[in-house]
Amino acid sequence: MSPRQLELALKRQRLEFEAAAQRRELADSVRPFQPVVSAVDRVNRGLRYLKGHPEIAAVATVLVFILRPGKAFNWARRGFSAWRLWGKLNRRLHGS
């Protein structure tokens, strides 16, 4: 192995060690957030499941409207208001 190749191999090895140390440091620094990240992941999986099975959301919505119509209409009104606000913000941000 030529001196240049040896130098490059040593430099590469040093960089790999530094990268491994940085990965460990990063993993240690985000470890306190693991419960939050796990909860967000569970919610995300649930939403993806519901997106693939809209009949579950429809049945749940109908049950809420039957069992608690007052609360259901309040939540529907809030949801509609949030949807309109999101549309206005989206139009302003994207200039449409």
Image: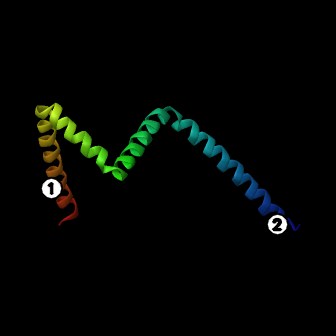
Residues 83 and 15: in front is: 83
Q: What number is the disc on residue 88?
A: 1
Residue 84 in the image: x percent, y percent?
A: 14, 52
- Write the residue at 71% across / 48% down: 17
Q: Work out whether 21 lies above or below 94.
A: above
Picture disc at residue 5 = 2
Q: Could you tell me the amino acid type at mark 1? A: Lys
Measured Cα–Cα span from mark 2 to mark 1: 61 Å
Q: Quadrant of residue 29?
A: top right
* Most foreground residue, 53 or 10: 53
- On screen, residue 16 versus residue 53, left or right, reads right
Q: Amino acid at mark 2?
A: Gln
Query: In which quadrant of the rendered view does residue 15 lie?
Result: bottom right
Q: Which mark is residue 32?
A: none
Which quarter of the rendering shows the N terminus?
bottom right
Q: Nearer the viewer, residue 78 or 70?
A: 70
Q: Position of residue 5 (x, y in %)?
A: 82, 66
Q: Residue at x 39, y 40 (%)?
A: 43
Query: Of all residues shown, which one is farthest toward the right?
Result: 1
> Picture coordinates of residue 91 (x, y %)?
18, 61
Q: Which residue lies at the image location 26% right of the left edge and 39% below the top edge? A: 60
**Is 75 situated above or below 3?**
above
Please tell me in which quadrant of the rendered image residue 8 appears: bottom right
